[in-house]
Image (cartoon, coloured by chain):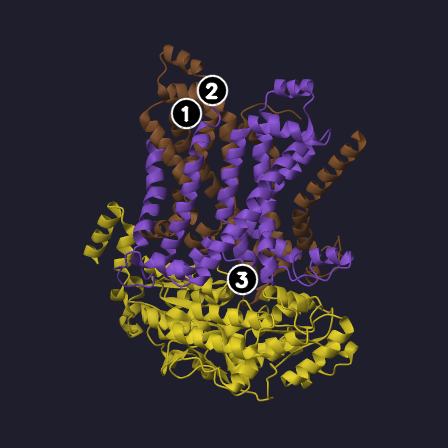
Chain colours: A purple, B yellow, C brown
Amino acid sequence: MTLPAAVAMTVFVALPALLSLIGSFFEIPLTGGAWRFVGFGNFTDVLSDPAVLQAIRNTAVYSAITIVPSLVIGLSLALLANAAGRGRPFVRTVLFLPMTANLVAMAVVFSWMFSYPGGFVNQVIGLVGAEPVNWLGDPATALPVVALVGIWRTASLTMVIFFAGLAAMPAALDEAARAEGIRGLRKLFLVTLPTIRPTVVFATVLAILSSAQVFDTINVMTQGGPRGSTETVLTMTWRIGFGYFDLGAASALAFLLLVVLVGIGILQRRTLSGWGR
Amino acid sequence: MRTRSIARAALVASVLPLAACASDSGPDASTAAAADIADCDPADSTLTITHQPPAAEAVAVAVEAMNREYPELEITVNAVQAATYDEFTRTVVGDIAVGNRPDMIVSGLGQLPFWVEQYQPAPIDVDALPATYRRAFLTAGTIDGDVYLAPAQVSVPFLAVNQTMLDQAGAGDAEDIRTYDDLIEAARKVTAMTGQPSVTIATHNIPDWLSQAFVQGAGGTFITGDGRPAFGDGLGVDAISIWSRLHAENLELGIVQDAESQAAFDSGTAAFLVTSSAGIAARVENIGDAFEWAAVDLPTVNGEQGPAPAGGNGWIVLSDDPCRAAFANAALAHLLSTDGVLAASGTSFSYIPVDTAAAEELLASDAVTQQTTYAWSFDGEITPWGGWRGDATAEVIGAFRTMAQQLQAGADPEQTIQTAVTTIDQLVAE
Amino acid sequence: MRAAARAGLLAATCVAVVVSLFPFYWMVRTSIAPADETFFQGIAWFPSAVDLSGYARAWTDGGLGRAMVVGLLQTLSILALQLLTCVPAAYVLAKVRSRATGIALTAVLGCLLVPSQVTLIPLFIGVNVVGWSDSLVGLVLPFTTSAFGIYLIRQQMMTIPDALLEAARADGLGHFRRLTSVVIPMAAPGIAAFSVFSVFAHWNEYLWPLLISRSPDMRTPPLALAVFQQADVGYDYPALAAGAVIITAPIVVLFLLAQKPFVQGMSGTEITG
């Protein structure tokens, strides 16, 4: 019964990934001509390219400033939606909405909101007398703004997961905590989080994946600029592969990212496969 | 042919498609010179046209004409939904890599060397072009004396000026802005009135094109005959340092993205915009009656009026079969006929018409305004866009982008521009 | 104190609601505003006039009607294939204990981590060589199965008591019958939750259709919007926003209809409220 899935997974995921790995040891001119074996040449090339190193740094920074806030905000929102009284269904629905957004279209809307000098955000900060900020034009602010869009979206996703985890918590646990007089943050850390630990791990993995693989928003909002400040590993892979037509180097870079992600996956494997047991 | 498809099937079966294509798409698929169309049977031939959205109207005209002329010819139209010429190039390269080579494509003029070097297209049959086609534009599609591309939708960089704001600030007339000094003087007055920078020259999409326009406009040399950067001399540095000069006086907004910079002008935030004449129609549409504005020539550092680099796009014939190449050239004549050009430069666009009859008709139409007239009556001298070694094009543009954005942020012009010259020289020399 | 806490809670909820909704609001606002009000109109909450011409252009020039049909066919085909492949696999991974399933689970988790860009180029070349570019098959096939789907549905199936399956086996039901008559009904919320995820993801998918579809007839909804974002010619903001509204609306409606089973499926329990 696993056969269809196994075949599909092999043909559409494992095999292409393997081909990518093989390809990363060759020079592959997409514009024609034969492959040439270059050993680890592509890997040393990409790792010595300052633009690629900047992209790796940016990805690390982007991940750092999106993963934790997405999780914290997602959890807070889930608790908030849980606590909301009569408006609960409405609040829940609204907070889930960002997850449904078409990122390509939404990224355009965010570029309008952050446009300089008179975009919505600048108008708002102008109310308190602040000078307009060139959000997407300044290398110092471009990455945080793109990250903000990432948080907007990912927090909604993690919130759904936390919300579901909270809903699955036995009511008896709640009552017991109340009887013991445990509430507020102490309850969160002593009772709630340990109970929904697998949910936390799952949400974390999803947040890591969506951060490390950010592409659509950057492609629409900044295309990696200004001056490479929002270039990430995946946009760089795309640029090398389909802009410079150097598939070998692109494969090498994509593969490095894959190694890191699989590494994280291995660390979390036990918890992941155990969730729901 | 038969052995090739069997070999291909075998390779697919052995699930190594990647290797299959890389070895298959090489030099064996070189371009064929066009046969005499009289020797070709339309029923035995096909024609594949790959284009992107701005060419859609003209393609419709040409396909209809071809269907009438050669009812038996099977024509396939691939309308790639790419937003930029780079994105389009990427898609077509992918198609060719897997054996789907189109017979004709519409290419950004800046990508011409890339196509010529990587895919050896056949020179275009210039004699077959309509009599009213403006042959002077073929310069923009010529490499080493051969015409590989027939420009279809041409544009040049220009300066858009919000005359209403100039009047309010007492900053004179748009038409009088000829030099950087004129621009800076007018911009100072507008900025003094509004309290914010008044010029916007975006640096993301076309930094190389604008740099070329600034240098050539001043009579300088941008690129040498053998494709090396030549803008590192005094005149080149002065011409390109427009960004840093404006920044030094806080006159330039610092907007990076082109669409955002155009929007700053449309909304009356920026009084001066440097952009492509292709966007004039969109400006007219967006601005409406909100304010008076004018399209004028780019100011230059010394008031000279040198040739502009031609932007926009044109057709390249990539057929690898003599008969299909012949039909492609026949289609080209329709694409660039008066009707085709009217569709391509038509009233919803503001490309410079490449056909004299079409230009006259457009200038007599209701859609004519000061601004569209600027595009439709453009008669200046043009040069090819860029000319860097084809496979380095994307990286060279990247180097220009970095340079322009550093200047825009106030970097030292001499040092920044020399760094760009060195970087680009290395890229094209590799 | 209690009142202050409640007020704080209420304020936080309001902020969260506004932040979530605002981009959607701005999208709708732009779609109905006259072209010259797209940008920089101060904090104009409402456009000065309603101009619906953007919708007309989005529908006709963008060919959104046709694109929505293609998008629907693509999304539903993918969903059907994914359910056919994922549900049985999830069942085996959840309920058959053996060394092999342990290894298979590791493989699934491994595939979950493969970024789509790693597989993009080989898949693109493969699909073209077989001749499936610019076809529904080419749009759909690479998404035949989903590691995420197998994982999510498996988690739901883990909650089904083994005793129930044992009873079914004692009644002489084979794996297939046990799957259809016991497991699927009980795992329905999980399957529904995954379905919603799948539909969202593939309706909004941009990169793969951009590589595969060629003719106007094969445009998917996000691709149709590219017509209004021509770098050379300039952007048509009202039409772009109108198009975005049109392609987002079905997803939002679907979500409003499906959110209850969706959350239920994610948590594996009944929810209230």
Query: Badge 3, how many Cα within 10 Å: few under 14, some, many 20+?
Result: many
**Quarter placement of the N terminus of chain A:** top left
Please name the residue shown 55% across and 44% down the image: A67
Eyeballing the image, is C71 above or below A223?
Answer: above
Cα distance between the residues tagged 1 and 2? 9 Å
Residue A225: mark: 3
- Locate residue C117, reporting x and y percent: 42, 50
Say left or right for A64 vs B197: left
Quarter of the image for residue A222 reads bottom right
Query: Mark 1 falls on what kind of element?
Result: helix
B240, B336: nearer the viewer? B240
Report the mark closest to the observer, 3 or 2.
3
Please name the residue shown 41% across and 62% down the image: A49
- Locate residue B21, reporting x and y percent: 29, 56
Query: Badge 2, how many Cα within 10 Å: few under 14, some, many 20+?
Result: some
Q: Earlier in the sequence, mark 1 or mark 2?
A: 1
Chain assignment, label 3: A
* Amino acid type indicated by mark 2: Ile
Chain assignment, label 1: C
Residue tagged 2: C160
* Amino acid type indicated by mark 1: Ala
| Mark 1 vs 2: CB contact within 8 A | yes
Eyeballing the image, is C27 above or below A100?
Answer: below
- Locate residue C193, reporting x and y percent: 52, 32
Residue tagged 1: C94
- Locate residue B225, reporting x and y percent: 39, 84
